[in-house]
Image: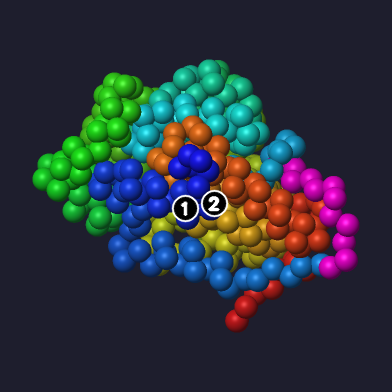
Amino acid sequence: MGTLDRCHSIADLRRVALRRLPWPMREFLEGGSDDEWTLANNRAAFNRYSLVPRSLCDVTAIDTSVHVLGQRLAWPVMLAPTGMTRMYHGGGEVAVARAAANTDTVYALSTYSSQSIEQVREVNSGPRIFQLFSNPGWEIALGLVERAAAADYSALCYTVDTTAAPNKERDYRTGVAGSRAVPRSLLSILRRPRWVAGLARGGPMTLANLGIKPTEVEKYQWREATRMSWDKLAQLRARWRGPLLVKGILSVEDARRAVDEGVDGIVISNHGGRQMDCVPAPIDLVEEFAAALQGRADIIVDSGFRRGSDVLKALALGASAVMVGRAYLYGLAAGGEAGVVRAITLLREEIVRDMRLMGLNRLSDIDAGFVRREV
Ligand code: FNR
């Protein structure tokens, strides 16, 4: 039995991942901003909800498919955009995109990916999302949008919660922020030759879509990031023909306005606790957003999802789909492409089992009657 087969949950994959990763990468992956209140609350929030099963149901015909952004998806979990994925395993975004393609899972590629829009296209012909940061500059961002369209990405996802560099104190300690050489970090890297060899195979780490080193991005990105506007969203809407998502919205007024601007979906997200601290857990906002939007746009939610039951809670509260970030990165760090497949398989098996235990054949049948807010 291999290591991955001995992992029976995302938590198990996380334990293996954290062992395999050098200290700075571990801290970068795990960390949140400021006091990490949001990071902790993202997980704690799920405990505020319980699921209410129905009994005496024939559950022989399980169907996990959902309709999102005008498409039928095999299941409601998508892989969230995460930058510089080669940091966790040499296979990087290409390994994740392959795992996604082989499991009928939608993958969202980050602007700050370590492998390019086109490289990912080569290994994944299924529905794919391109996540856009306008931080590198508006003209550059528009160029990326054109490349994503040329490479046949089905949806564009504009991330709007990055108007300042986050205060991630773990990264100051390890030297990841500021590019300072920290002896403990170097030692930890040297002690993991397998990780180093994996990274070395793909050559130096770059932000592949921009053709620059990760350290170079610091020079300009946060100045441009402060220039976000509703007009830019409108420009994207005018240029992008396919479904447009806006990610990082936490205010219901903003969600309404974004829908008025013509977006097709809102990703309720606090960036996994990595941007502003002390903001709500997205799961706590789903119900309010669903009531406000009345089906005018799809609601996708992320931050803190680690279990199939978390996904069912979100769907019962009114979400159309869920994104996971760290959950698949743990799989990647634990075992490359096969590790991502393992993470996806575990989440999917949990959803199927939980649907049976909940008396649900179809995810489209789930509603507020299946969830209860604990006080
Ligand atoms: C992210 N996230 C992110 N979001 C985005 O829009 N563009 C990006 O490049 C990144 N990069 C990134 C790196 C890492 C290491 C993490 C963990 C996260 C946020 C991501 O898309 C998603 O919102 C969170 O990961 C969701 O929280 P969980 O699932 O990690 O708890």
Q: Could you tell me residue 310's position as x and y percent?
A: 60, 59
Q: Could you tell me residue 25's position as x and y percent?
A: 29, 44
Queried whether the magenta region covers residue 65, the answer comes back as: yes
Q: Name the residue that disc number 1 marks.
A: 12
Q: Any mark on residue 8, and which?
A: 2
Q: Residue at x 85, y 47 (%)?
A: 61
Residue stretch rendered in magenta on the structure: 55-68
- CB under 8 Å between callouts 1 and 2? yes
Circle 1 sits in a helix, a strand or a loop, which is it? helix
Under mark 1, the amino acid is Asp
| Label tally | 2
- Residue 289 seen in the current view: no
Q: Residue at x 30, y 34 (%)?
A: 195
Queried whether the magenta region covers residue 157, the answer comes back as: no
Under mark 2, the amino acid is His
| Nearest the eye: 138 or 201 | 201
- Residue 351 seen in the current view: yes
Q: Residue at x 65, y 53 (%)?
A: 350
The relative height of residue 220 versus residue 314 in the rendered view (above or below) is above
Q: Residue placed farthest to the bottom in the image?
A: 375
Where residue 371 sits, quadrant-wise, is bottom right
